[in-house]
Image: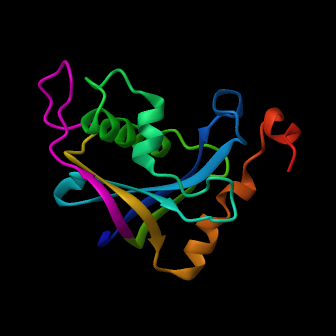
Amino acid sequence: MARGMSGTSRVTVFPLLHRWSELHNAPMGRCIVAYAEAGEGGADAVLGVIPRPDLVDGTPSLMDVAARHAPSGYGPQGPNAFGSWLACTGWSARVTPKPGQLDFPAAEWELDVHQVVRDLQPQGTTAKSVYGHRNVHVGLFRLTDPRLMAEAEGVLDQVSLSLAEQLQPA
């Protein structure tokens, strides 16, 4: 059973193309990800999928998505590399906003935590954190304000589909 955590902080909501049809012999998978911070000084990265069961694979495990990306810049494949890649993904979405992405300066949120990676170990450096985070919490994300949650659920409606997605049969 997942445990929960909650907070009030800046929340960045962005679309994520997490599966490519030509590589997986299946329809492309898109989901909506929320990134927040918790703990003293934002030591904890919080990343969760905004549930959209109407999407093809719209509620993936973010740790599985990270594993499929096989990040190589964070040491051996495993929880540290996957958690570091997720911290990078959230942080990068925040600092390089894309069209259709949302950023709420102070929003209340809840996360059904599915997995936690503690004490991230940066590779090739003496740093004590990865993108400012020591821990990564991953799961299903909800904004407690129904209006903000509705906006977040609509993020993919603002994103143009790629040509390959437009050509896929429904």
| Placement of the N terminus among the 4 image quadrants | bottom left
Write down the region rendered in magenta.
111-130
Q: Relative to 164, is 76 above or below?
A: above
Q: Main secondary structure of the magenta part?
A: loop
As rendered, which of 103 and 154 lies closer to the eye? 154
Instruction: Say whether residue 97 is left or right of residue 105.
Output: right
**On the rendered structure, is 34 left or right of 157?**
left
User: Picture coordinates of residue 81 (x, y %)?
Assistant: 30, 32
Quarter of the image where one finds residue 17: top right
Image height of 127 relative to 73, above or below: below
Front residue of this view, candidates 109 and 94: 109
Name the residue at 78% across, 43% down: 161
**Residue depicted at x 68% and y 58%:** 55
Question: In the picture, residue 133 is in which quadrant?
Answer: top left
In the rendered image, residue 156, in percent from the top left (x then y), is placed at 69, 55
Rendered view: 49 above or below 124: below
Q: Please tell me which residue is depicted at 37% across the width and 35% down the height of the picture.
A: 85
Q: Is residue 117 magenta-colored?
A: yes
Spot the residue most to the front.
25
Q: What is the x, y in percent for residue 91?
A: 40, 42
